[in-house]
């Protein structure tokens, strides 16, 4: 029996694990008390790692589709088949006829992050899609526009703040989210112990709201007007104190005229928030010694996602919180992904090209998923004919999932890198299953860049992989070497492949650490060997002031009144009248929710994560239920422009009247041909069977899946 230490990669918190292994089998997992970030905290997902690792439904060898069903094949045969079909597609239809869809698990390991850009370049395609454009693209776009890189993402310094305003986020369930903060519950409690306050603005009294000092309901989709009104109060009452930001932020004066129409009284009816509440929140934010505004899905997943999240930046800058302790700060990761990404990929940019069918601009070299089905189903030059799915399940995660389902079935060729036969890759021609995370060395290159405290950690292999299996990095390198051979000839491709294998991951990580900020600028002089001497992780201390030095704009300045934002502002102004009229109607608005034990759709095959309160139901206010003849436990039908689904009703006053709420990531039993048997046995439909791919933020392309207009009626029969 042996004990190993790793970080959990099932969500962004990346809590430390203490893993007990016997006879090469995981027999116990608990929180690592010596981990400097999580200090022994572990949510139920971390404990369930052994379920996922030992899951009998998990694929461990390549399979291909045949008339008789899935057939196991060898790795070399599988790699040759996939490479040949992708190259044939490119030869017939061009590079952009091949698309990639990337699910969020790719961010938890070095392999996909480093190798997928190489594979895209080798194939000559710009057709890259990911879960980011259903989730967070406004944040990436604004980081690029204001700071010069989509990967420079500020986070609230929760360990030192005195006032945290949470808008449209639920960090107690997400364990953060674009904010790596293990044991966020304890961190929020620390704010109150210091005499500070946590305030939540959300259409639902979420888990975070129930533990906060105050919660205020807001009508879904109107965050942009609430935030604009807060800015208006801060400016007109003379509360703006940008502090050091004045030295490197331009365009502050232009904000006053932009927000002038949005007084608290003008937005009160549209938002459902009393004017005096909005005014007091603005004063509290400006008056706190140390404060920060944090916003997530409820702000990003709207038709005004970019403008709304821009106002989060404006509030933090105007009140002097940017780059200040306890405020709105940037991490300085040991593996400096923003800098490395800028030098090695084409991620830095916006609107350099547009989608073929709808003309939506790319953000950080990605097209929005709302137009993925268009690109597959619409004939013409550049039509997507083949697709590579990596750790993704767009049928359950992308708006109008039924249309996505039909589009995937229409492809000439589909290959998937995944553990399971899921709702999307059941249409695949080949599935290449990687080893699980505990079976390979890992190094987190993403989440230290959004951490609330600087840290670094190497993840050793915990158990030996089964014979004849491959990691995700080995799968991607095998495909890349075959594409390279077609592009440059076998001899050069072989030499390049050998060089990559010598470099990745250890030599690359060591080089990155040596040339990174903690290898050059700080006294730590980090190397991989030094990091490996700290099996529980190495604490590099609290966030530090790094601006304007860390800015990646050409002039090392922030233009707050960026032309991309100001060009969209007339649409925001014009929308207030409609939002006010809509607030007077009886139209129901749908919002989503997640559970602490459920990270999207790919964790539903373990029983311990799909019991208790983590079940599928429609939350509705009792008054809305009564007006529709619905009692607690009744079956209801929820309809939108694109379809309808059914769910059992749970009445609760935790929800704002006029709002209904469904969980994300369910619907496994609604489609045949999946391999995860426990997930398929669960009740529940996919909320994305009724979300609308025509609703999106036109600036960032992010899907507007929240504030979806729906009708709700009692089910019959």
Image (cartoon, grey):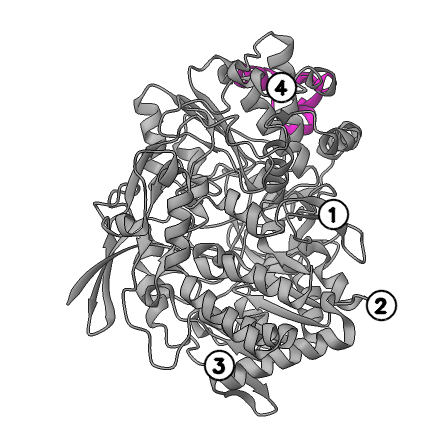
Element assignment for label 2: loop
Rendered location of residue 232, percent (x, y):
65, 16
Q: Are marks 4 and 3 in contact (CB under 8 Å)?
A: no
Q: Which residues are magenta?
A: 259-283
Q: Is residue 441 visible?
A: yes
Which quarter of the rendered picture does the N terminus lie within?
A: bottom left
Real-space CA distance between mark 4 and mark 3, rounded to the nearest whole angstrom: 55 Å
Rendered location of residue 629, percent (x, y):
62, 49
Judged by its main secondary structure, the magenta piece is helix
**In this figure, which residue is indicated by the disc labeled 3?**
62
Determine whether 147 is above or below 177 in the image: above
Element assignment for label 4: helix
- Numbered tag placed on residue 380 in the rendering: 2
Closer to viewer: mark 2 or mark 4: 2
**In this figure, which residue is indicated by the disc labeled 4?**
231
> Quadrant location of residue 554?
top right
- Residue 265 among those drawn in magenta: yes
Does label 3 or label 2 sit earlier along the sequence? 3
Residue 643 lies left or right of residue 533; in this view the side is right
Does label 1 or label 3 sit earlier along the sequence? 3
């Amino acid at each position: 029996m042996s004990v190993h230490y790793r970080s959990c990669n099932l969500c962004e918190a990346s809590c430390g694990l203490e893993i007990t292994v016997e006879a090469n089998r995981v027999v116990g997992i608990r929180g690592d008390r010596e981990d400097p970030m999580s200090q022994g905290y572990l949510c139920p997902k971390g404990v369930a790692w052994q379920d996922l690792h030992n899951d009998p439904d998990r694929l461990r060898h390549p399979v291909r589709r045949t008339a008789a069903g899935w057939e196991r094949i060898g790795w070399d045969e599988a790699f040759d088949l996939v490479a040949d079909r992708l190259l044939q597609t490119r030869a017939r239809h061009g590079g952009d006829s091949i698309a990639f869809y990337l699910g969020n698990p790719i961010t938890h390991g070095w392999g996909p992050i480093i190798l997928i850009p190489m594979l895209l370049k080798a194939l000559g395609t710009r057709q890259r899609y990911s879960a980011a454009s259903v989730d967070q693209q406004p944040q990436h776009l604004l980081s690029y526009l204001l700071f010069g890189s989509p990967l420079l993402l500020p986070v609230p310094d929760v360990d030192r703040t005195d006032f945290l305003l949470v808008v449209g986020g639920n960090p107690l369930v997400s364990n953060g989210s674009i904010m790596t903060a293990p044991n966020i519950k304890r961190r929020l409690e620390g704010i109150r112990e210091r005499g500070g306050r946590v305030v939540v603005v959300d259409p639902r009294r979420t888990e975070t709201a129930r533990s906060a000092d105050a919660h205020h309901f807001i009508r879904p989709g109107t965050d942009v007007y609430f935030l604009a009104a807060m800015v208006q109060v801060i400016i007109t009452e003379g509360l703006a104190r940008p502090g050091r930001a004045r030295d490197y932020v331009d365009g502050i004066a232009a904000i006053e005229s932009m927000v002038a129409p949005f007084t608290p009284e003008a937005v009160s009816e549209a938002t459902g928030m009393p004017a005096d509440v909005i005014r007091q929140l603005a004063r509290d934010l400006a008056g706190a010694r140390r404060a920060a505004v944090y916003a997530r899905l409820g702000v990003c997943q709207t038709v005004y996602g970019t403008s709304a999240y821009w106002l989060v930046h404006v509030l933090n800058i105007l009140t002097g919180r940017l780059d200040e302790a306890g405020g709105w700060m940037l991490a300085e990761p040991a593996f400096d992904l923003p800098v490395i990404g800028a030098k090695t990929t084409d991620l830095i940019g916006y609107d350099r090209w547009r989608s073929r069918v709808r003309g939506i601009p790319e953000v950080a070299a990605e097209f929005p998923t709302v137009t993925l089905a268009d690109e597959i189903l619409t004939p013409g030059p550049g039509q997507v004919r083949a697709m590579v799915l990596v750790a993704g399940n767009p049928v359950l995660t992308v708006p109008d999932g039924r249309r996505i389902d039909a589009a995937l079935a229409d492809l000439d060729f589909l290959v998937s890198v995944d553990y399971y036969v899921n709702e999307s890759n059941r249409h695949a021609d080949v599935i290449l299953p990687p080893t699980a995370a505990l079976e390979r060395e890992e190094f987190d290159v993403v989440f230290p860049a959004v951490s609330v405290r600087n840290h670094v950690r190497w993840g050793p292999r915990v158990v030996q992989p089964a014979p004849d299996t491959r990691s995700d990095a080995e799968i991607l390198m095998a495909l890349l070497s075959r594409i390279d051979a077609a592009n440059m000839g076998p001899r050069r491709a072989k030499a390049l492949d050998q060089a990559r294998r010598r470099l990745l991951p250890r030599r690359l990580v060591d080089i990155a650490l040596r040339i990174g900020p903690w290898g050059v600028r700080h006294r730590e002089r980090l190397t991989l060997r030094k990091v490996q001497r700290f099996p529980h992780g190495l604490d590099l201390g609290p966030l530090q002031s790094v601006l304007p030095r860390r800015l990646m704009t050409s002039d090392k300045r922030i233009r707050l009144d960026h032309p991309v934002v100001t060009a969209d502002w007339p649409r925001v102004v014009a929308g207030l009248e409609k939002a006010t009229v809509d607030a007077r109607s009886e139209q129901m608005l749908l919002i989503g929710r997640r559970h602490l034990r459920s990270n999207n759709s790919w964790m539903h095959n373990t029983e311990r994560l799909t019991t208790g309160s983590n079940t599928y139901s429609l939350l509705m206010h009792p008054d809305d239920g009564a007006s529709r003849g619905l009692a607690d436990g009744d079956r209801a039908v929820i309809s939108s422009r694109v379809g309808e689904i059914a769910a059992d009703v749970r009445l609760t006053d935790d929800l704002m009247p006029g709002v209904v709420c469904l969980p994300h990531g369910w619907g496994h039993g609604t489609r045949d041909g999946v391999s995860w048997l426990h997930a398929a046995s669960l009740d529940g439909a996919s909320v994305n069977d009724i979300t609308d791919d025509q609703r999106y933020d036109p600036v960032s392309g992010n899907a507007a899946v929240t504030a979806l207009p729906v009708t709700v009626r009692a089910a019959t029969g």
